[in-house]
Amino acid sequence: MGGWSVRLALYAAGFAGGMAFDVVFTDGVALPYLLGAALVAILVGSAGAYRFVLLLPAAALYTLLAVYGWPPLSPSGWEALFWQIGQDTYEAAQITYVNPVPYAAHPGLLVVLLPIVIIVVAFSISATLYEESPLISIAVLGLTIGVLGTVSFETGIGPYFTVFLISAVALLLLASDRRERLKPAAVLAGALVAGLVLILPDSSIAKEMFRPALIDWTRIGAAGTSRLAVEADVGDYLTRGRDAELLRIQSSKPLFWRGGTLDYFDGMRWSSTVEPGEDDGEEVSDEVETIDVVQKVEILEAETNLLFGGYQVQSVSVPDAELRSDGSWSSARPLAEDSTYRVLSRVPQPTTGQLESAGASYPGGVEEKFLQLPADRPEVLSETAEKIQADYSPETPYETARAIERYLISDGGFTYNLNVDYGRGDRALEEFLGEGRQGFCTQFATSMALLSRELGVPSRVVYGATTGKQEDPNEYVVSGYNMHTWVEIYFPGVGWYPFDPTPGFSVPDTMQANAPRPDLPDDLSYVSPEAPALQKETPTGPPPGREAPLPGEGTTEPGGEEPALVPLYALLSVLLLVLIVAVPLTKRTLLARGRAGDLYRDLAGRLRDLPGAGARVADSPALTPTERVLLLAGAAGVEAAPFRNFARAYSESLYAQDPRPDTARTYRKALREYQKLPRWRRIAAAVNPVSLLLRARRCLAAYGKRLGKMLRRRLERFRRVR
């Protein structure tokens, strides 16, 4: 399989697979490194008998030169280089732990990934050129691109997949040792398959079937093991998933829809240590006035165990719902799309006087848990806290909280920016409070919570959503754009009270009616145009006055039947399309080479795929071609003579010294006999993929045996040399 047409298709697929690793990095910064790695891999994979000998040395040498330049000449230089590689690799592990993809082109990440690129691509090249297994090459490269697409949420993977798909189809068509030209039908079939795969994801059927962003809320802290990164997670919903409609909430008051809280900060991430029965301080004191607000929540394009509602949620209509010590609620089973539940909230209405006079006599559990700070926190945190204390001279915890809020919103020179990228999670806070001063709600809420603790005021981070877009009177739609984090501060004798330090955002008036945020400067230059303060939303939806009736208390309603039929219809349509088009085209493509083996596998596959034939008895690998064909013909109920003649001709082509060139003629006669079967059976066989799956399994098994033999021979040779 060394023809240049095969090599060109194979090399194009290899380049696509290697360069697809670029989706792991930001802004294409790693493309030159990956291009070089793919080129080295192609050269090594094409090196014949020396390919496995060269593989690891070439991967190590290229990585060393690409990342660190020419190696040193002295022993001490090598020692320093190895120390640097170890340090970079350790930092890379930290980066991947605390940050989502994509990453900056850190040397440690390149040290890890460049050898992987070379090994994967070189193995794929070798599988086709020397093991004559293009299916293995396509499987390895396709799986690699699939995994990269998954970890990157398919961002940026499209061009690489397109090149790979076209190259893979061309490789399947070209990978043979025959000299005749490809038949037009084969080329057309390959083009149709490639076009179908590329077009289908953007079709209306696919858009009905695959929602744009099914948000798993537990990813941002609903469960004990869930975490919220300082520089990331919520941003995924504000950018990639911002248009996904997640919740529809009917409420007489616009509120923030609280999900849960995060109380422990390890220097890089917030996490929740909430346990049942813990004393997190009274959520709302009995001395504080409250107002009751009933909400109906409908799950849209989301799935969640967490129950959202205005603070403080008193009761929910979900059976077996659990109240946690931080005032949040969770469901024992996930609530999927079209589920609904009702919430009763008692919104606290403390006065400014109550908050001012609350004092600083905190319960022991509150001090221990909500004044926690990491030992290795950056110096800029204490420096900023000292500056706030000096500039504003707050005398009470409430004045301290308002001073921090004002500093972050207006006086500190911070800007709301969704596109900020802090490459190191362990340095994100330092960069944000230092020279960066740009970020979104996660950075602002983190900073206020930690500055409060630095100044001795208990705090916790809250995650949930802003009010959302009003579509009807008393009805709001929450999308990914509304994902938000804010802060709650503890006041003895009052409870937990919300603050929002993000520029352009504000706690709804209902939640701060008696203790509103003091007026801030009118200058909005510090607010990004993306912030809600500068957004003008126009209500959409049905005309005013058409308020849907709320369901009875304690009900959980499934969605109506008609909407549920749309995804089912789309799923059935896609499956039918694949069966009708992809399977027959694949069979036709495999037959296009016209070799004796192709004719045999096609005829046996047709018989094997017939419905009701009971042909599994012919799957045994111990059968000869003649025995297998005759068994299949008997099970199908066709005349055996034409199939016997074909099987003999095929066997002669395999074993006879001077075979007669009548395999194609006997194949056509057997095919005419096959076509006497009822049309419905032949159509069902054409769309049945069983024979293709069996064929793929045999190819993989054969390749595994060859690979095992090769490894054993090399091991024996190595032992003899030693």
Image (cartoon, rainbow, N blue to C red):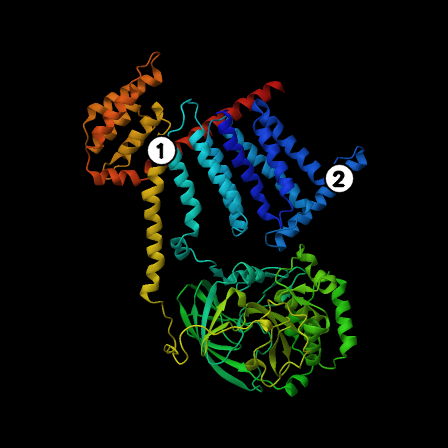
Can residue 608 be seen by looking at this rendering? yes
Judge by depth and name the residue closer to the eye, 641 or 682: 682
Q: Tell me where residue 196 appears, x and y as whole percent.
A: 40, 44
Q: Tell me where residue 594 appears, x and y as whole percent.
A: 35, 26
The local crowd at label 1, few if under 14, some if 14 to 19, many if 20 or more residues have their Cα within 10 Å, is: few
What amino acid type is highlighted by mark number 2?
Leu
Q: CA distance from mark 2 to mark 1?
A: 57 Å
Quadrant of the rendered structure where residue 640 is? top left
Judge by depth and name the residue closer to the eye, 239 or 493: 239
Residue, x 35% and y 50% (percent of image)?
574
Q: Mark 2 vs mark 1: which is more N-terminal?
A: 2
**For residue 356, which numbered disc appears in the image?**
none
Q: Closer to the observer: label 2 or label 1?
A: 1
Residue 527 placement, left or right of 284: right
Q: Tell me where residue 379 appears, x and y as whole percent.
A: 77, 63
Give the residue pinned by disc 1.
185
Give the residue pinned by disc 2.
81
The local crowd at label 2, few if under 14, some if 14 to 19, many if 20 or more residues have their Cα within 10 Å, is: some
- Describe the element under mark 1 as helix, strand or loop: helix
Residue, x 73% and y 60% (percent of image)?
376
